[in-house]
Image: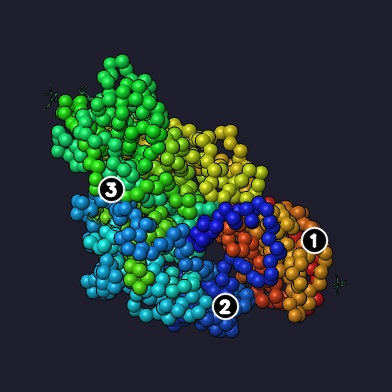
Amino acid sequence: MKSAVFFALLPTLLSAVSVHAVLPVPQKIANLPTISNKFIIEVEDIATIPNKRSFKRSLDVVYDSLKSRAVKFDVTKEFDTAGIFVGAAVTLNTAEDVAAVANTEGVTAIRPVKSFKQPVLAKMHVLTGLDDVELPPSALSTHIMTGVDKLQAEGNIGKGIKIGIIDTGIDYKHPALGGAFGGSSLVYTGYDFVGDAYTGDNDPVPDSDPYDNCNGHGTHVAGIIAAQPGNEYNVTGVAYGAKIASYRIFGCTGVVSEDVIVDALIRGYKDGNDILTLSLGGPDGWAASSSAVVANRLAKLGKILTIAAGNDGSAGSWYASSPATAHDVISVGSVENTVISLQTAIVHGAIYRPITYFGTDPFAVLDERPIYVLTNSTTITNDACNPLPDSTPDLSKYIVIVRRGTCTFVTKLANIAAKGGKASLIYDNGNGFAGISVGAYTATLIQAADGEFLVNQFFAGVNITISFPQTGDRISALSSTGGLMSTFSTFGPENDFSFKPALSAPGGNIMSTYPLALGGFAVASGTSMATPFVAGASALLLAAKGKTPAVARAARDLFETTATKVPSSLTDGDPYQTLTQAGAGLINAYDAIHGTTLVSTGELILNDTAHFNGIRTFTVTNTGKTTKKYTLSHVPAGTALTVQADSIFTSFGPVPLSTTYASAIIFPSTFSVRPGGSQLVIATIKPPTGLDASRYPVYSGFIDITSSATDITHVSYLGLVGSLKNKQVVDNTDATFGVKTPILIDAVGDWQTAATNYTFVDGDWPSLLWKLAFGTPALRVDLVDSAIKITPTLSTRGLFSGWFSFPHPNKGGSFAQVKVVGPLASFDYIPRHSDLDDAPYSLFNLETPTFANGTTIRKGTYRVLLRVLRVTGDPTREEDYESWLSPILGISA
Ligand SMILES: *[C@@H]1O[C@H](CO)[C@@H](O)[C@H](O)[C@H]1NC(C)=O
Ligand SMILES: *[C@@H]1O[C@H](CO)[C@@H](O)[C@H](O)[C@H]1NC(C)=O
Ligand SMILES: *[C@@H]1O[C@H](CO)[C@@H](O)[C@H](O)[C@H]1NC(C)=O
Ligand SMILES: *[C@@H]1O[C@H](CO)[C@@H](O)[C@H](O)[C@H]1NC(C)=O
Ligand SMILES: *[C@@H]1O[C@H](CO)[C@@H](O)[C@H](O)[C@H]1NC(C)=O
Ligand SMILES: *[C@@H]1O[C@H](CO)[C@@H](O)[C@H](O)[C@H]1NC(C)=O
């Protein structure tokens, strides 16, 4: 998505932008946070408008009122679905008209329109054939990582579930995608909202056919959900029994304006889809955009919405993408495909499935060997961490079975080698099935359930032997990052501290379908690929548990509590990856559907220290058939140092981690629950101490709820050391331009240092440039008297500022007591800038001597006052704003 392209360029850009050079003061090309003349208005119910006369629709009341006041407006689209969204997309050409619409009775909200770029993938490689070196050895490794293979083996392929894909359209003529459109086809319905030629700058040309043979993104997404098995590459969708609706919102190239997305969301809902998935978005940090608002309503109504977390991982923390920011949707991060060879071992002496293990080559054991199990317990935490007892036999002829945990793999294997052991299988303890580092030893990881089986058989006296076939059956290829977060996956949290992303899914190195005209199959990387994976898993969930709103609303908690924790590296002992990138972990669809422990909430958001909420409760319900004894424990993840040392700027990704963790007291920490019973748990979490609060450390982790090695669920928590209200928002350094910002740029493009008069003739007008180091809920630009007596919080050196927008309501309080001559511009809920973006600043041109409402500014001398509210600040309190006062500006028009 948006700046994934910068991922590849990161090393160069980092050195060019943030270390060595400074950017030239930019040309006076406006660069504003939103499209300046497009808005989406929302109107109230006709019943609640007092003065509706004979009108039947609230929109007509509003139009009539605007016409009667000679307000010029152009309706580009209407939304008229009561209970979801009633409003219109409008083009308004003067600030005066914007103000008039905002003040019209019946209008409940006017939100500026955002535009979203085409998702730019971290990787997109069209496969050239079965001998392509980029061909992953297995199309199914992602299914194995997440338990989807086991669900499909049970026959759950998502039958009866409908999924709407809002994307670039689909090549439904692809044989793996059904080969046809409409009726009983896989792609059962859809709509093209835009047409091939749409770029975002021209008018959409809609039609009823969402066919795509020029873009490809949506076809790749569709295959991840629903590719039909049996194709030449064995690409198989997660829910290939589900039906797909295709909503095409991108042309062959270009951007999409948000009103089109809102339209598609509503249509996807009205068409009766159970799940809507959007692999798109842009950096935001807030949940206030129209698309986020509508997505959230649909989620509340009982639809599952899966939305990409974003591909801006290199831009660092606090960069959550919208509309994934919507509070009730599932924001999805990306985990690298294990792309490590999975081999199989054959069990003799008992009837058991082949055991899968990680390895590029088969285990170097040629004969069939008996197993030796070190400890008669499948829950021991420190198996073989100490020298083995004297009673241990010579292990050289055995395959040694040892449990993962507490000490490093190499320590365990050294202790085993001291007793002659030459080959070991380490069974997982819930940390996740992945490739591991074992030094020079012959050892590999197997899954917890397989380990438990071997332990139990051994101690029951069953003579088990294992052999390792040396040919065939390799089902995946080596990757040093498999199972880790993709570096491109965006870091949250949201500025209001919402938990983003919610969880992760395989999105790095994913093979799927591609338009036939463009090659037929491709390998791609992006949260665009992870998102449909979760949509597919959601279909399996609805197919298993019933497609009711209650199941849909509980889906996120269920996926979060059963997810597999994601490590920050493959070295055992390193912390888990910060939940600000991984969310609650890698989706485990099998456990989400078959787990028999239900935890009432997935997320404990502790907030910052100023709003700290550290004493939390949740319930644990045993939905199994036997009484279970639970043990609860605290498992921290790496603490994200979200801001650079001695700087106001956020850390670049990968965000550095600290191992200074929170602590937790859990009560009760052990208990038994009868079948169908529940237990209330109180978790008291204490933030870590001793961390530098100026790094804005975000700590996170899990409360694990364990009843057996295969029955582990968790609640995820997230908190901040420090107060967001202390976080400086406006960049007042000279880091970017070699001159301290904000600055006023004069007619010839120089930054203004002394009092300057502007005539507003032939380009003689000022521009205001600012850069935000952090997001803000409110940014205001006002014209004030040149002699104003206020002390701005940010140093002023004879510069100026100014922009465009609609007037903000007078909120009262000390903010309102600052005497302004009139507003020039305002923006609400805007994101920070990123040095990795094309233009890491905003630029507002005051091209005409007019206030935001269009009224002419009288001749005179003024200054521009820029005020930016800190996150969690009170909009009525002047003290909660950062302020900057420009040099004197003479308006002589
Ligand atoms: C597809 O699966 C079949 C059967 O498992 C296997 O023989 C074939 O090699 C696979 N093809 C690819 C490209 O993985
Ligand atoms: C192993 O442990 C199980 C469960 O605690 C017990 O029933 C069994 O007798 C033990 N077997 C041996 C050989 O110690
Ligand atoms: C396992 O093997 C041992 C030694 O070969 C033998 O004495 C024992 O009876 C076997 N046990 C079973 C259950 O087959
Ligand atoms: C965190 O606290 C702020 C300030 O009270 C509040 O606005 C915000 O909603 C809280 N965040 C969450 C996720 O509860
Ligand atoms: C700006 O215009 C005012 C009024 O016309 C004049 O007094 C002042 O000298 C001018 N300032 C500059 C810097 O030209
Ligand atoms: C426009 O804004 C200016 C400055 O706040 C104010 O003086 C003027 O009355 C407003 N005009 C209208 C038509 O609201």
Q: Inspect the image, locate mark 3, and give the three-letter code of the amino acid beneath it.
A: Arg
Foreground label between 1 and 3: 3
Foreground label between 3 and 2: 3
Q: Which residue is mark 1?
A: 798
Is residue 400 among what the camera can see? yes
Q: Which residue is mark 2?
A: 92
Q: Inspect the image, locate mark 1, and give the three-letter code of the amino acid beneath it.
A: Gly
Q: Which element type, helix, strand or loop, lies under badge 2?
A: loop
Q: Which mark is residue 474?
A: 3
Structural crowding at the residue carrying mark 3, measured as other residues with C-alpha within 10 Å and reported as few (<14), some (14–19) or many (≥20):
many
Choose top left, top right, bottom left or bottom right for residue 714: top left
Q: Which element type, helix, strand or loop, lies under badge 1?
A: loop
Q: Residue at position x 65%, y 59% from top?
A: 771
Q: Which element type, helix, strand or loop, lies under badge 3?
A: loop
Q: Residue at position x 27%, y 55% from top?
A: 540
- The picture places residue 572, in percent across and down from the top left corner, at 42, 35
- Rendered position, 13 above or below 590: below
Choose top left, top right, bottom left or bottom right for residue 430: top left
Real-space Cα separation, disc 1 to disc 3, in angstroms: 69 Å
The figure's colour scheme reads rainbow
- The picture places residue 90, in percent across and down from the top left corner, at 52, 77
Structural crowding at the residue carrying mark 2, measured as other residues with C-alpha within 10 Å and reported as few (<14), some (14–19) or many (≥20):
many
Tally the marks.
3
Real-space Cα separation, disc 3 to disc 2, in angstroms: 61 Å
Choose top left, top right, bottom left or bottom right for residue 462: top left
Foreground label between 1 and 2: 1
- The picture places residue 432, in percent across and down from the top left corner, at 35, 41
